[in-house]
């Protein structure tokens, strides 16, 4: 046998003999996802332990390959990244808005202090095994029902303890609190508040990862915003008020950029520039109250710049 051919035949054996293992993992990405029971780690498919999704943990190593420990959850929570192309192991569900696999409800949700609860999800109702401690000291219920306390107020857990002041809207609470589902003020982020993930926002409100801000989309013709909020013309929930915003005249991308009472609307300038404007219903709502001061802008009204 020629010397070159012999080397090619013996090369794999020689590599293994000197302790250099071959990387034989199946390559993967969003367009080529791994099989069920595997996760895509550093571009290669590796096996994951299905039962570890949602399990208690202290560090990432407690969860296994391809998984992270969510330290904000009570007792930790093993998480696995997912997407529309990369699904979750058996016994877990993919929360697409969070990009994470969460433990499924029913017989899979047996962990103490956890129960089946609703996960913020813009594409439709989604339930998973979540912390069950509520602001009134109760617990969530299993079997596909939503815990009354909703998702976490800060890092994956509900705030326990006594009730705060009674409230009807977020704006009847102190500045660092919001109005909970039971009608009492509780610590937590409001719509428009800074966030790191969706679980820090109110129920059915999502954390815009680009802006790091709690946002809720809505239909201006059929508003579903919470009490004290209105649906702005650009389809986001903002505080319902008619005062002149501090941001009046500044350029904007969303009405939430305009802070209190502002609306991000066309300014009439060349190039379609959007600016923060004051909302109005009648001419007298605008500074000076001159005839025609309140003009129609798209589907809403605003004071002329």
Image (tube, rainbow, N blue to C red):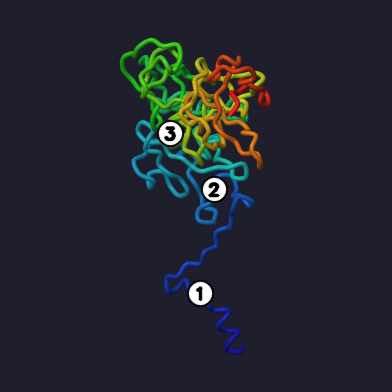
Q: Which residue is label 1 attached to?
A: 13
Q: Which tag, 2 or 1, sits closer to the chain's start?
A: 1
**Residue 29 versus residue 10: which sits nearer the camera?**
29
Instruction: In this rendered view, identify the residue nearer to me: 26 or 274.
Output: 274
> Mark on residue 194?
3
For marks 2 and 3, the one nearer the N-term is: 2
Residue carrying label 2:
38
Q: Tally the marks.
A: 3
Disc 3 packing (10 Å; few <14; some 14–19; many ≥20): some
Disc 2 element:
strand
Q: CA distance from mark 3 to mark 1?
A: 56 Å
Cα separation, mark 2 vs mark 3, equals 34 Å
Q: Going by the picture, which residue comes out furthest to the left?
A: 161
Instruction: Tell me where residue 73 appears, x and y as whole percent.
Output: 39, 33
First of labels 3, 1 by sequence position: 1
The crowding category of the residue bearing disc 1, from other C-alpha atoms within 10 Å (few below 14, some 14 to 19, many at least 20), is few
**Numbered disc in front, either 3 or 1:** 3
């Amino acid at each position: 046998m020629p010397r070159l051919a012999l080397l090619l035949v013996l090369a794999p054996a020689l590599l293994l003999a000197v302790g250099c293992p071959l990387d034989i993992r199946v390559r993967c990405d969003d367009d080529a996802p791994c099989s069920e029971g595997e996760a895509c780690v550093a571009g290669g498919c590796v096996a994951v332990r299905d039962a570890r999704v949602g399990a208690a943990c202290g560090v990432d190593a407690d969860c296994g390959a391809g998984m992270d420990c969510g330290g904000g959850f009570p007792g930790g929570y093993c998480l696995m990244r997912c997407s529309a192309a990369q699904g979750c192991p058996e016994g877990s569900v993919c929360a697409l808005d969070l990009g994470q696999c969460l433990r499924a409800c029913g017989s899979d949700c047996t962990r103490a202090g956890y129960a089946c609860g609703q996960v913020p999800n813009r594409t439709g109702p989604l339930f998973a095994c979540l912390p069950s401690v509520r602001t009134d000291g109760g617990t969530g219920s299993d079997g596909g029902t939503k815990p009354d306390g909703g998702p976490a107020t800060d890092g994956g857990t509900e705030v326990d303890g006594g009730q705060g002041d009674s409230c009807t809207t977020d704006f009847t609470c102190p500045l660092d609190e919001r109005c909970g589902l039971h009608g009492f003020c509780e610590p937590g982020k409001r719509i428009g508040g800074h966030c790191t993930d969706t679980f820090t926002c109110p129920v059915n409100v999502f954390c815009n990862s680009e802006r790091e801000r709690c946002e809720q989309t809505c239909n201006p013709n059929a508003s579903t915003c919470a009490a004290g909020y209105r649906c702005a013309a650009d389809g986001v929930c903002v505080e319902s008020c008619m005062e002149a915003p501090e941001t009046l005249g500044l350029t904007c991308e969303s009405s939430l950029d305009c802070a209190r009472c502002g609306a991000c609307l066309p300014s009439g300038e060349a190039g379609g520039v959007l600016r923060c404007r004051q909302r109005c219903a009648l001419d007298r709502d605008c500074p000076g109250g001159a005839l025609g001061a309140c003009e129609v802008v798209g589907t809403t009204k605003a004071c002329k710049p």
